């Protein structure tokens, strides 16, 4: 019985620790989205999360490590959403359908505006010069890339894989630029359907090169 109680207490402490980590990450990401990396203070984050300053040191080691972790977590959610969209494509998917799936997580953020777009802007900005530790997401980047290549190789068999990978990176860079540029804020006034109608042909063009969409 004593052993069971110890296990239960350990589990409760672990759950409490995870709630604290999650709360700190959420608060950090909200503050980063509002003010940028230079405008965030440790006290503001802990006040918003309902945690003490020592919790940051215990769970993350420093304010910078917490901010890096929060942004990395947001990037991971974005990659997971993109992978989900790409995995849902059937074997006969067109380049237009691929472009829509590839762009849809960003389209949702652009259409939502506000906090969602601010978070994507933060992720895109930091992604220009990724911090150490982001290499743990290499597998998800590769999975997303493979999802796109699965369709691209069917429609563009004459293009070698290295060039197709380059095109997917260009398409991803285009989406990041939309998040960072003033046009991203302008698009927030549109519906997701309208943004997708405008954006999908552009992304498909990046994939297509000089080939014909739907080939």
Image (tube, grey):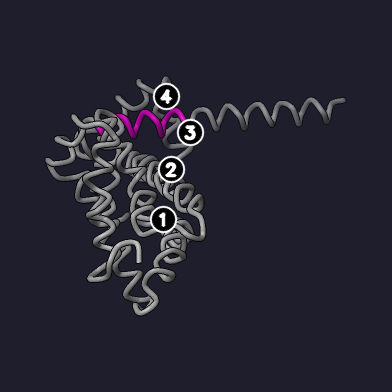
The answer to whether residue 181 is magenta is no
Give the percent coordinates (x, y) of residue 61: 42, 42
The numbered disc on residue 21 is 3
- Tell me the SS state at disc 4: loop
Q: Nearer the viewer, mark 4 or mark 3?
A: 3
The numbered disc on residue 113 is none
Local packing at callout 3 (Cα closer than 10 Å; few below 14, some 14-19, many 20+) is: many
User: Who comes first in sequence, dot 4 or dot 3?
Assistant: 3
Query: Is residue 12 visible to us here?
Result: yes
User: Who comes first in sequence, dot 2 or dot 1?
Assistant: 2
Query: Is residue 31 visible to us here?
Result: no
Question: How many numbered marks have been drawn onto this rendered protein structure?
Answer: 4
Q: Nearer the viewer, mark 3 or mark 2?
A: 2
User: Who comes first in sequence, dot 4 or dot 2?
Assistant: 4
Residue of label 1: 133
Q: Quadrant of the C terminus?
A: bottom left
Give the percent coordinates (x, y) of residue 70: 38, 40
The residue that appears at 42% across and 71% down in the rendered structure is 153
Q: Nearer the viewer, mark 4 or mark 1?
A: 1
Vertical placement of residue 45 versus 178, above or below: above
Q: Main secondary structure of the magenta part?
A: helix
**Which is more toward the observer, 151 or 5?**
151
The answer to whether residue 25 is magenta is yes
Give the percent coordinates (x, y) of residue 22: 47, 32
**Which is more toward the observer, 54 or 41?**
41
Residue of label 4: 52
Residue of label 2: 77
The residue that appears at 39% across and 28% down in the rendered structure is 53
Quadrant of the image occupied by residue 168: bottom left
- Tell me the SS state at disc 2: helix
Work out which residue is located at the far left of the displayed protein and give it.
182
Which region is colored magenta? 22-33
């Amino acid at each position: 019985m004593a052993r069971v109680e110890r296990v239960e207490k350990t589990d409760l402490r672990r759950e409490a620790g995870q709630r604290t980590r999650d709360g700190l990450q959420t608060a950090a990401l909200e503050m980063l989205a509002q003010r940028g990396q230079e405008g965030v203070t440790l006290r503001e984050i802990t006040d918003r999360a309902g945690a003490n300053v020592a919790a940051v040191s215990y769970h993350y080691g420093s304010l910078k490590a917490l901010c890096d972790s929060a942004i990395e977590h947001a990037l991971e959610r974005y990659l997971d959403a993109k992978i989900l969209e790409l995995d849902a494509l059937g074997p006969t998917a067109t380049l237009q359908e691929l472009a829509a799936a590839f762009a849809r997580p960003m389209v949702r953020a652009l259409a939502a505006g506000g906090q969602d777009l601010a978070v994507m802007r933060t992720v895109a900005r930091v992604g220009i010069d990724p911090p150490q530790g982001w290499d743990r997401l290499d597998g998800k980047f590769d999975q997303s890339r493979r999802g796109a290549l699965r369709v691209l190789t069917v429609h563009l068999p004459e293009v070698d894989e290295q060039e197709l990978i380059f095109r997917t990176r260009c398409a991803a860079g285009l989406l990041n630029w939309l998040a960072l540029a003033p046009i991203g804020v302008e698009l927030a006034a549109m519906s997701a359907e309208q943004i997708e109608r405008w954006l999908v042909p552009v992304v498909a063009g990046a994939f297509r090169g000089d080939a014909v969409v739907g080939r």
